[in-house]
Every structure is written in structure tokens, then in C-alpha cells.
Image (cartoon, coloured by chain):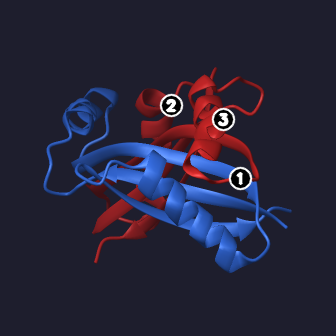
Chain colours: A blue, B red
Amino acid sequence: MKYIAEIDIMPLRELLDPQGKTVSNNMKNVDIDGVEDVRIGKHIRMTFSASTEEAAKNKVETACKKLLANPIMEAYTYSVHTAE
Amino acid sequence: MKYIAEIDIMPLRELLDPQGKTVSNNMKNVDIDGVEDVRIGKHIRMTFSASTEEAAKNKVETACKKLLANPIMEAYTYSVHTAE
């Protein structure tokens, strides 16, 4: 079965995000006011095969832990759905 | 009213994504097989205030068009929800 995982990897809340801060500060230059905070992370779309949804989630969890996210600076969330 | 926008900015399907390709090729080194494709883009979380949900969506649309996404190379999708 083919699955698609949508993974978000964001800088931890406790850490500064200078890229996000810069974007936040520049929103008024494109006439957007009322912006309080912008945080910028990564979005990863992974297409892969697995036998069951359980196995698919395990693969994504392993990928995040071992390769995609740096746990000292980043937190990850993901959702897995079958590919149409 | 306070809103949070979750914005995904991904490289267009037609374009090569060398960063994603590299990650994809390295999945087997962390014992994950069956990976077909990995695409890497940005995830942006924006906290902002707007009068209505309609206005909130307009703000996010404008932000993506004018500042966040490069339409030549990237496509954006977003969802807006009220902040708890």
C-alpha cells in the first residue's frame, strides 16, 4: 500500500526564530498589520510504501527521529494518509 | 479575533528538489525502505489578528503572494483557524 506522510518540523517554542522574526517585522511593508508572530520550519512530504497504516506511522516516526528532525532544536508533527 | 495560519510552501511538482532527493536516497541508511519520493518545503505558522475569518484568509493570501512564496518555483496551501 502506498502512503503519503505530511511532516511539519518546527523550531521549539523556547528558541528564537530569527528568520520568522524578520518575516514578521516585514509584514507591515506589504500592508499586512496585526501580525503577532511568525515561526518558520520545514514541511516534508514523503511518499512511501508500507504494509499497514501502523507500519507506515512507525516508518515516519523513525525517519523523523533518525534523519529529519533535530530534537534539540525542533519538534515534529505528522499525518499519514493513503495515496490516491 | 486572533487567528493562526498554517502555511505550507512546497517546490512545484515540475521542479527538481535536490534536498528532498538527497534525503530520499539516505532513508535506506537509517533502515527505512520503500521510500519513493521526498519533497522538502517550508512550513510557516503565523499568529495574527483579523476582524473576520474572511479577512483573516485574505491576509494570509496576500502574505503568501507578496512575501512568503516565490510563484515561479513554489506553490502554497494554507489553513486558518482561530487561536485557542
Residue B69's label in the rendered image is 2
Measuring 58% from the left and 43% from the top, which residue is drawn there?
B29
* Residue B27 visible within the image: yes
Earlier residue among tags 2 and 1: 1
- Who comes first in sequence, dot 2 or dot 3? 3
Left or right? Give the position of A35 relative to A46.
left
Q: Chain of mark 3?
A: B
From the image, state whether disc 2 or disc 1 is nearer to you.
1
Figure quadrant of residue A6: bottom right
Q: Which three-letter amino acid code belongs to the residue tagged 1?
A: Asp
| Mark 1, residue position | B33
Cα distance, mark 1 to mark 3? 10 Å
- Cα separation, mark 2 vs mark 1, equals 32 Å
- With A38 as the anchor, is A47 left or right in this view? right
Q: Which of the chains bears the disc numbered 2?
A: B
Q: Residue at x 65, y 45 (%)?
A: B28
Query: Which label lies toward us, 2 or 3?
Result: 3
Tell me the crowding category of disc 2: few under 14, some 14 to 19, or many 20 or more residues within 10 angstroms, Cα based.
some
Instruction: Tell me residue B18's x, y (percent).
Output: 62, 23
Q: Does residue A57 lie above or below B68 as drawn?
A: below
Residue B58 visible in the displayed image: no
Q: Mark 1 near mark 3, Cβ–Cβ under 8 Å?
A: no
Quadrant of the image containing the C terminus of chain A: bottom right
- Mark 3 nearby-residue class (10 Å; few <14, some 14–19, many ≥20): some
Seen from the viewer's position, the closer of residues B76 and A4 is A4
Q: Are marks 1 and 3 on the same chain?
A: yes
| Residue type at the position of mark 2 | Ala
- Residue drawn at 70 percent across, 23 percent down: B16
User: Tag 1, which chain?
Assistant: B
Picture layout, residue B7 above or below residue A23: below
Q: Is residue B84 above or below residue B36?
A: below
